[in-house]
Amino acid sequence: MTRVPVLAANWKMFKTTHETLAYMRELGVLVKTLDGGEVEVVVAPPFPSLVTAAEAARNTGVGVAAQNVYFEREGAFTGEVSAAMIKEAGAGYVIVGHSERRRLFGDTDQAVSRKLRAAISAELVPIACIGETLEEREAGKTDDVLDRQIRDGFAGLAPAEVAALIVAYEPVWAIGTGKNATPAEAADAHHHIRTRLGEWFGRETADQCRILYGGSVKPDNVAALTALPDVDGALVGGASLDVASFFKIVTGGLAARPK
Ligand code: PEP
């Protein structure tokens, strides 16, 4: 089964609209130089820059993602943004359940489940983030945490919906810390996730679903991670803020993919 790799940039709360435009123009030119082989290169700017990013990305092959979504269609929810609004802004993807949302803003697995369903209904591709904290890893609970996040977060999704979404395995202790998972740790976690997807949603679903690694991915460590058979790309935070660094991650990640 060949899965199209995904290299996604999560800018978090960085970059103004002007900075977004400059970055997207430069990235568009670089992505056009990629020869052969399918890839999805995705950029997730803050909400105010979605339209600018989507317009600049047109005809470049670069996709645009929102960093969060609210699950209601509309209403008195000050400060929230719906899936339909994100879609109309021109984005094709949305990050759901990022550990910063879970830790700082109280997103539960139940909220993640509702957000995933809202995103899918609006025909956005969710990038669903899961991953354990350091405390959970040290207590030997990594697999249990991943199981809970998949079981409760993906509750009510049809196998075809799970096959079409993108999972990002992001160990919380590796995000923004400069400490990435070793290839062996990433291989174990990705294998576990794919096995569970197979058991709960069917073998075909598990074979189709892209699973990205995220957590301190840099130009010099991306190859060792994307060379793993169950790793289908990367979700990159800090090292994606510089366009040259992100493009090095794209090319380095692609070159290392198993043929
Ligand atoms: C992220 O924000 O999803 C992330 C992986 O961040 P960083 O690459 O900075 O660890």
Image (cartoon, grey):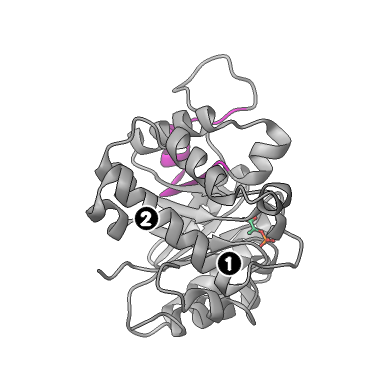
Q: CA distance from mark 2 to mark 1?
A: 15 Å
Q: Earlier in the sequence, mark 2 or mark 1?
A: 1
Element marked by disc 2: helix
Which quadrant of the picture is home to ligand 1?
A: bottom right
- Seen as rendered, the residue at the extreme right is 177
Q: Residue at (46%, 75%) from the top-left corner?
A: 228
Is ligand 1 within 8 Å of the beta carbon of the residue shown at mark 2? Answer: no
Label 1 crowd bin: few (<14), some (14–19), many (20+), radius 10 Å: few
Task: Specify whether 246 is left or right of 75.
Answer: right
- Quadrant in the picture for residue 63: bottom left
Q: Which residue was labeled with disc 1?
A: 185
Position of the C terminus by quadrant:
bottom left
- Considering only vertical position in the picture, is 38 above or below 214? below
Task: Specify whether 198 is left or right of 155.
Answer: left
Q: Position of residue 91 (x, y in %)?
A: 45, 48
Q: Position of residue 162 (x, y in %)?
A: 33, 45
Position of the N terminus by quadrant:
bottom left
- Considering only vertical position in the picture, is 135 above or below 215? above
Near-viewer residue (204 or 200): 200
**What amino acid is labelled 1 in the image?**
Glu
Q: Residue at (61%, 47%) from the top-left corner?
A: 141
Residue 120: assigned label: none
Residue 195: assigned label: 2
Q: Residue at (55%, 69%) from the top-left corner?
A: 25
Q: How many marks?
A: 2
Magenta-tinted stretch: 80-97
